[in-house]
Amino acid sequence: MQRVVLLLAAALMMTAQSASAQTLKTVKERGTLVCGVSQGLPGFSNPDDKGNWTGLDVDLCRAIAAAIFNDPGKVKFTGLSAKDRFTALQSGEIDVLSRNSTWTLSRDSSLGLNFAGVNYYDGQGFMVRKALKVNSALELNGASVCTQTGTTTELNLADYFRAHKMKYEVTAFATADETVKAYDSGRCDVFTTDVSQLYSEKLKLANQNDHVILPEIISKEPLGPVVRHGDDQWFDIVKWTLFAMLNAEELGISKSTLDEAMKSEKPDVRRFVGTEGNYGEQLGLTKDWAARIVRHVGNYGESFERNVGTGSRLGIARGLNNLWNNGGIQYAPPIR
């Protein structure tokens, strides 16, 4: 009797999984992953003059395509404003949102969406002109502040100034470009957003050396990819694509060492590259799904340094985004 019950439970589970596991099937039939990104944020998701997208968030989309198709080019990028990003995902216009979006309780629980992990630990900060001779955000009483609508930035700004009994005047804009242009033209004293975005937007200013990012970090902004509720298989694929990039860095598997890793006798490396176990099949992918990601995109550290790290135009230190065993808090569950 117990065996019958277990078999029935397994059958029901398989039925539920097949009913909800539609996104991978849709993506494969279409032959392209549709990925929602920003409308242009250097280092994270930004097109060049020929429409070629690059960035940390873009790399995650390319990694998903590599895992599915063995081809990181099979991605269509859709630029979305902060206001429209979640609606585009809810409506099915995109398959995954990989666009500097903060994971919060309300977004996770009330929008019908799942955050699949954190690919960048960030926090909100402030940028001002050096001419103001301001060294701390606590000196901003009475300042006019430019920010973007439809983001957590406005709420954090209000909380911070209220907590420190300071007054401010806010000027909000629909897009990041409008916001940075308003600040650059002198319509406000301060520009506030996530610190990573401040580094990125600073590159667009007429005289970037005339501006400084203040030291205060006033919020937690865990940024990561988002999928719709109701398709656990797709949720797992997006989540484990990010985890694969992190695990690859921890295991020392990079583009240059992948061929060597394919011959390794180490159990954790063998599980990663697919020469042992059936972990790819459990996701609905191939045995070498994780090796494909590294081969075409690289590990998390390679992606970070290429797009936003100290060797890039942004020049951001790893900080919190270092691996857990190197002073940071990036940590992925094991493939086993």
Image (tube, helix red, strand yellow):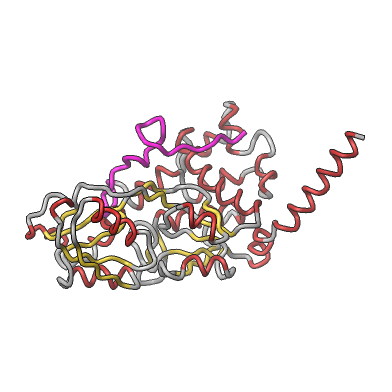
Magenta range is 310-336
Residue 253 in the image: x percent, y percent?
A: 48, 37
Q: Decide which of 74, 121 is in the foreground and name it.
A: 121
Q: Decide which of 324, 276 is in the foreground and name it.
A: 324
Instruction: Answer with left or right where residue 191 lies relative to residue 322.
Output: left
Q: Would you place residue 215 above or below residue 107 in this image?
A: above
The reply to whether residue 327 is visible in this rendering is yes
The reply to whether residue 257 is visible in this rendering is no
- Write the residue at 47% across / 67% down: 85
Quadrant of the frame with the N terminus:
top right
Q: Decide which of 86, 336 is in the foreground and name it.
A: 86
Instruction: Answer with left or right where residue 140 lies relative to residue 257.
Output: left
- Write the residue at 10% across / 57% down: 130
Main SS, magenta region, reads loop
- Reply yes or no: does residue 189 show up in magenta: no
Residue 301 in the image: x percent, y percent?
A: 40, 42
Residue 322 in the image: x percent, y percent?
A: 37, 38
Q: Decide which of 23, 279 is in the foreground and name it.
A: 23
As drawn, which residue projects farthest toward the top? Answer: 266
- Reply yes or no: does residue 314 show up in magenta: yes
Residue 252 in the image: x percent, y percent?
A: 46, 34
